[in-house]
Amino acid sequence: MAVLLVKVIKVKKHALADSLESVLRVAKCLFTEDLERSFEAGDVVTREALIEKGVINSRKSLVGHENLVIKILGDGELTKKLTVVANSFSEKASQIIVKCGGEARLNKEI
């Protein structure tokens, strides 16, 4: 009986962890000036590219990088044509990116 009880508790614990992970999201706001500093003209800016370049450090967050929600805000100058893929954009950020000939793509996977 005790072995069965332990197995049920372990299963429930894993189910709870999976449920929490699916609802936990960490929002990271970046500015257009961050993109200017970190990327070259013609680059595609994705969550993975932001982590790879060290703009975002997902190891410091409580959730995995797949749960990071990226929002781009329009503060600072952007002079490079970039394709930016993020979960949301401020209106000003979209305008700045498009004005440089780039593209602001919404990523709806989270």
Image: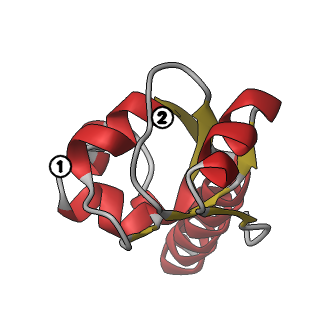
Camera-nearest residue between 67 and 40: 40
- Name the kind of residue labelled 2 in the image: Thr
Measuring from the top left, give residue 20's x and y in whole percent: 66, 51
Camera-nearest residue between 73 and 5: 73
Where does label 1 land, which residue? 54
Q: Which mark is residue 20?
A: none
Q: Please report contact status of discs 1 and 2: CB closer than 8 Å, yes or no.
A: no
Measuring from the top left, give residue 66's x and y in whole percent: 50, 65
Q: CA distance from mark 1 to mark 2?
A: 16 Å
Residue at (40, 40) in percent of width and height: 62
Camera-nearest residue between 77 and 74: 77
Answer with left or right where residue 53 lies relative to residue 3. left
Measuring from the top left, give residue 89's x and y in whole percent: 73, 41
- Name the kind of residue labelled 1 in the image: Gly
Where does label 2 land, which residue? 32
Residue at (56, 68) in percent of width and height: 14
Residue at (71, 66) in percent of width and height: 105
Q: Quadrant of the N terminus?
A: bottom right
